[in-house]
């Protein structure tokens, strides 16, 4: 069953979201988790959350939002995060969560749904190639100065990131 995340789901959601962050090697902490959880339950915030529940257990999560697409003068749905517990993969749970987002398109005035994944995520790319059209755009990541950084700080940070990723 697919449903909105509820307050009672926080402990299980936290475990799943930590798994998602671990997969992408993104450091996670309580402050970030609390912020996301607050966003999901703030009706006025853009970020929304879904879960896939199987026999009373949450085994998948998805975060999404409405996003303007200026070049078309339209709105689309944007899938920010999608994660299924490893032992429940292969049961079309991710596909069902994406299908649910598609069903929300009319109510949200979306003219489509968009998402990205890391180039190394081969399993996800296989699924996405089956259920969606590849736009042909290649994702490119840029690092920018944060408000408190100087050019020399950025050079040091980039060198540290490069060293730690090797």
Image (cartoon, rainbow, N blue to C red):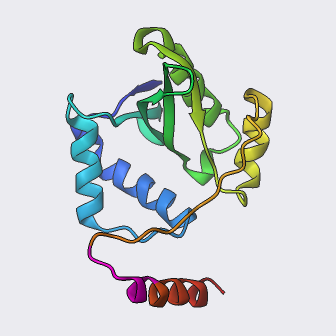
On screen, 154 above or below 52?
A: below
Report which quarter residue 18 is drawn in.
Answer: bottom left
Answer left or right for 89 relative to 108. Answer: right
Measured as percent of width and height from the top left, residue 89 is found at 65, 45
Q: In the picture provided, is 40 more to the left or to the right than 156?
A: left
Residue 44 appears in which quarter of the rendering?
top left
Q: Between residue 91 and residue 131, name the one nearer to us.
A: 131
How many marks can you see? 0
Q: Is residue 152 magenta?
A: yes
**Looking at the image, is 39 positioned above or below residue 105?**
below
Residue at screen point 79% across, 43% down? 126
Q: Which quadrant, please, contains the C terminus?
A: bottom right
Residue 11 coordinates in the image, percent (x, y)? 30, 52
| On screen, residue 5 above or below 158 | above
Quadrant assignment, res 149: bottom left
Left/right of residue 129 with respect to residue 117 in the rendered view: right
Residue at (51% x, 28% y) in the render: 69
Coordinates of residue 67 in the picture (x, y in percent): 44, 30
Between residue 6 and residue 142, name the one nearer to us.
Answer: 142
Q: Residue at x 67, y 33 (%)?
A: 92
From the viewer's side, name the closer residue of 11 and 111: 111
Stretch in magenta: 148-154
- Which is more toward the observer, 39 or 163? 163
Image position, residue 133 (x, y; %):
76, 29
Would you place residue 18 above or below residue 139 in this image? below
């Amino acid at each position: 069953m697919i449903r909105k995340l509820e307050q009672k789901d926080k402990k299980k959601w936290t475990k799943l979201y930590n798994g998602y962050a671990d997969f992408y090697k993104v450091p996670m902490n309580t402050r970030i988790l609390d912020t996301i959880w607050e966003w999901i339950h703030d009706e006025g915030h853009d970020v929304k959350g879904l879960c896939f529940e199987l026999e009373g257990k949450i085994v998948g999560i998805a975060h999404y939002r409405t996003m303007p697409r200026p070049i078309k003068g339209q709105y689309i749905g944007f899938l920010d995060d999608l994660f299924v517990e490893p032992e429940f993969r292969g049961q079309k749970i991710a596909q069902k969560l994406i299908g649910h987002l598609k069903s929300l398109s009319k109510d949200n005035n979306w003219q489509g749904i968009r998402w990205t994944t890391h180039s190394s995520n081969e399993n996800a790319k296989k699924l996405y190639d089956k259920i969606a059209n590849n736009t042909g755009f290649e994702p490119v990541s840029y690092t920018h100065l944060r408000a408190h950084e100087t050019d020399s700080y950025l050079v040091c940070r980039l060198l540290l990131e490069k060293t730690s990723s090797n």
